[in-house]
Amino acid sequence: MRNLSHAHKFVTSLVASLMLASAANATDIQAQAAAPAMLAKWTGPHGGVPDWRSVNVDEFPAAFAVAMNEQRAEIARITSDKAKPSFDNTIVALERSGQTMTRIYTYYNVHTSVLNVGKLPSIKRELAPKLAAFGDEINQNLPLFKRVETVYQAREKLKLTPEQLRLTWLTYTEFVRAGAKLDATQKKRVSEINQRLATLFSDFQQHLLDDEAKPYTLIESAAGLAGLPQDLQDAAARSAEARGQKGKWAVDNTRSSMEPFLSLANDRVLREKVWRTYYNRGNNDDASDNKKIITEILALRFERAQLLGYATHAHWRVEPEMAATPARAMALMEAVWKPAVAQVHTDVAAMQKIIDAEGGGFKLAPWDYRYYAEKLRKAQYDLDLNEVKPYLQMDKLREAMFWSATKLYGLSFVAAPNIATNHADVTAWEVRDAAGKHAGYWYFDPYARLGKSSGAWMNSYRNQQKLDHVLTPIVSNNSNFIPAAKGQAVLISWDDAVTMFHEFGHALHGLLSNVTYPTLSGANVARDFVEFPSQINERWLLTPEVLDKFALHYQTGKPIPHALVEKIVRAKTFNEGFTTVEYLSAAIIDMKFHLAGGAAINPVEFERDTLTAMGMPDEVVMRHRTTQFAHAFGSDGYSAGYYAYLWADSLTADAWEAFEQSAGGAWDKPTAARFVKEILSRGNSVDQTIAFRNFRGRDVDTAALMRHRGFAPALKRPVK
């Protein structure tokens, strides 16, 4: 599972985001006499690019005020049109509205996710409820909804194209789900709830950022570094020096620092300290504590769901997804849970034998799991991932992603150093199609820094569309790698390499989109489908074509030995029990939180009691403990929807078998072309169940998921 921080961040259309997110009345924010420069239309070739130099954080409130007034005027023109509501004068007119708002949201979303420092946190908290109110102002606009409803009810008589029918259905459905049919009192309460939730989401995210930026584990003796490779020791030294502790070492409170330390550090006391610091984020009864926030979020979500006519927030949230009901999502999770837990118990027993043989004299604890898993991997497969890391240079893996996209889809990537970016770490690339024609831009923001959300994600700066003229997409991939010393290669873990390919899969989903309307573009699909293109892109990393060409030793330049690759392949399902339980426990807890009803919930007690009832192994903790679970409580995005990664992985496992069973194997051109035609280019222009059926020739075979995770026998491959 890849951690896509907040989701908000990576896949909603900006028009749809506006519907779900929010804004404020113009009377609340007074625009400055001189309009902020960032309101200007983007300039440059190919429809323009963001002008990051125009952004002044202090001007966000004024810029939003201008953009909101502009969109209000656009909506007023739609609702005052005397002509009978039609697809063009209502649905398309709505698609064209809010272009200035969309551009401002691009600047704002990027800054709040990667440069959330200085005045921005307080500005974000001020804007959050006001932006929510503006979204409701549009969603609850009765004259606007009536026009949309009129078109929707007449859609079969209007001779619309399939894509136009899909857009009409989606527009109408989103209005209804947002409360367009409620009475005035109900609408007012829904808007109040949305505004309060927006503030709570902002507070939750800021608390999490604070708990990642401020706490750290200080190592005062070199003995505490035993087991760590030199690049991690050097990074810890740089981190300590930056904190005024020169001559010592610091482990930052981020996943990118925590995971390698727990996997490699010999010092068990320090491992426990790093583990507790990380997994107690948001749960320290201090100014950054998130427990009360979670309780209030859950209560408000339940109340809103009831107002909207749903049994729970989970029912409301899952309805538009492929799963359609919480029961279907839970059925898939429960089917995988038992074999995953059984595998964890098997692995724990094997690791405990190693501890006992070493004379450890202790029972395996959560802070020991990763460390002894590496020893078990070595014992069972003769594989030490530390031997792999010198072959995993970040820049070479970026080249590998480009090469794969060229081989599969005909895309090429050309460095664009003259395009402005929002930070010195960020680089831009022009994307061209197989004919050499411009196809979009791709930005890469690889490094962790103060004010940047943890994890990895894709942002869409601009969605592909052909509404009035062709607009190519602009996307970015964002990671949190630890920078190397100047002039040295950035070496990353195998898991980080997989994550790079995962996020690039999201980018390809945006770049290869080929639809007319921006709301239907690229990755604006069902939440439990959107991870499918990204998860399948991970699979090409492990192919010999990629590893032979790009997994090169950072000192010698020699390719990774075939014997080492064979070990990786043999061990590819190793630790799958841990990985699945770590993720799936969080996904099940997320769903159960939102199925629990309206009673006040103590999140820590609920987490503990529910995990106990589920039979959660003592040696494993949720990938995102409740008080740091930004997917669920940093926005509505993945709330009651974290199961989506598993649902999408069932599609991925089955689709990958289509590649493997084809004449050309993983790089089969006809299969890749069909994947582009039926999946990557379609966006939300067709129902995702139909899109998968068109690609695979049938509905998904979920048995492929069990085979992929090593919980069922693998299929025999045809002899080529």
Image (cartoon, rainbow, N blue to C red):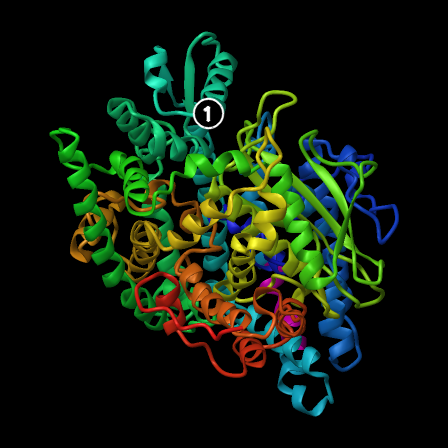
**Residue 610 in the image: x percent, y percent?**
21, 53
Q: Main secondary structure of the magenta part?
A: helix
User: What residue is at 39 percent from the left and 72 percent from the top?
Assistant: 715
Residue 133 located left or right of residue 322: right
Q: Secondary structure at mark 1?
A: helix
Front-most of 588 and 543?
543
Residue 317 visible within the image? yes
Question: Residue 7 magenta-drawn?
Answer: no
Extreme residue in the top direction: 247
Q: Position of residue 272 (x, y in %)?
A: 26, 28
Whole-percent x and y of residue 613? 16, 56
Residue 294 vs residue 591, the one in the foreground: 591
| Residue 279 lies in quadrant | top left
- Per the image, the residue denoted by label 1 is 232
Pick the front one: 605 or 549: 549
108 above or below 329? above
- Residue 96 horizontal/vertical position (percent): 76, 63
- Is 408 drawn above or below residue 111 in the view shown? below
Q: Quadrant of residue 336?
A: bottom left
Whether residue 109 appears in this view of the structure is no
Vertical placement of residue 181 versus 552, above or below = below
Q: Which residues are magenta?
A: 137-148
Please name the residue shown 51% across and 43% down the image: 561
Amino acid carrying mark 1 in the image? Leu
